Image (cartoon, rainbow, N blue to C red):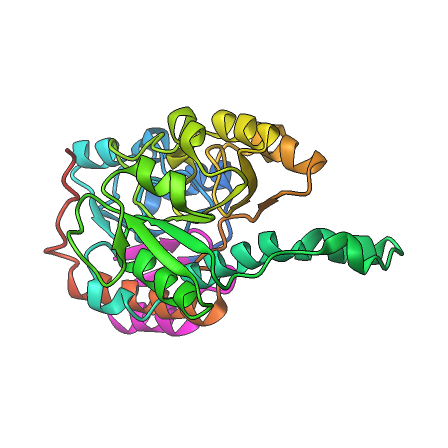
Amino acid sequence: MKILITEARDFSQTAIENLERAGCEVVARQYDYEELKNNIHDFEGIIVRLGIKVDKLLINSAPRLKFIATPTTGIDHIDLLAAKERRIKIISLQGESMFLKTITPTAELSISLMLNLMRHILPASQAVLAGKWERDRWIGRSMRGKTVGIIGMGRLGKMTAKLTKNFGCQIVYYDPYVKRTKYTKAETLAELAKTADIVSIHVPLNGETAGLIGAEYFRQAKMGQLMVNTSRGAVVREQDLIKALEAGRIGGAGLDVITDEMNGEISKCPIVKYAKKHRNVIITPHIGGATGEEMRKVEEFIVEKIIRRQEEAPVVKIK
């Protein structure tokens, strides 16, 4: 089987060697979209990260393609309907609950964004680089005693709750699919919005969660609330977020994901334009899971899964 690794920079060499030992011919390249479209035709399998949207045009440029593998839990960067039409298997980290319990970087980044917003770390550092040593200008707030609202109490929600609890925070969560935990449950999203000083979003992107956080949420949010999103950009209606930031209803936002992150012209995105002019928004380029150790770990895991399930990997069910 001929397999293409489409984003080969720092890809686990152990994973590549494991594929080769299993009898696969492996080609590792750092392709952009056009390069991939022009070279994908000869491959039976591809391994993708998050840098390229695997759309219908790309899929239909690969007549021999049998599977698309991604070392991620989210798979919204793949056109699932186009893959289903071609009976192409999707191999991902979805459903690998035991393994994923060992993967913590996204929760760690959520905490990092909270701390940056609470303590003004980024603008304070930028001010020093500009020659200004102004201690009193950057007086922040303590985490201890704050109420942290977790939207989505799955794996990452629970990790983030545990980490914030260690700072002395009170935890409230909203998740209609989780009945009870040791934390306080909000029966409605509005209840969480009204009580949380900081909100951290940890839901998958689907028909139910797309646009979940919008104008209605922001109208009810506690004044000055801080918001962190490390899930998917489309969960938050960004135009509504901008209005809430301008009104002071939301005091700051730490975003590792934005709606248009795969469209190529990031500088034109409204939330990026806003962040250029305001110090209360931090945007990082979807680096939640991007630590060297964990990336190698998940790449080696997904390769094991490819080897193990070349014949029986299920096609993702499209609802």
Instruction: Check if residue 24 falls in the magenta segment.
Output: yes
Q: Nearer the viewer, residue 1 or 208?
A: 208
73 is higher (above) or lower (below) than 291: above
Q: Position of residue 197 (x, y in %)?
A: 47, 48
Q: Is residue 39 visible?
A: yes
- Residue 296 placement, left or right of 137: left
Q: Position of residue 59 (x, y in %)?
A: 31, 36
What residue is rendered at 17% in x and 66% in y? Answer: 308
Q: Nearer the viewer, residue 251 or 242?
A: 251
Stretch in magenta: 1-27
Which of the 4 image quarters holds residue 3?
bottom left
Q: Nearer the viewer, residue 38 or 137?
A: 137
- Residue 258 placement, left or right of 216: right
What residue is rendered at 42% in x and 47% in y? Answer: 196
What residue is rendered at 59% in x and 54% in y? Answer: 118
- Residue 59 placement, left or right of 53: left
Q: Position of residue 139 (x, y in %)?
A: 71, 56
**Furthest-left residue in this view:** 312
Q: Quadrant of the N terminus?
A: bottom left
Q: Is residue 71 visible?
A: no
189 is higher (above) or lower (below) than 286: above
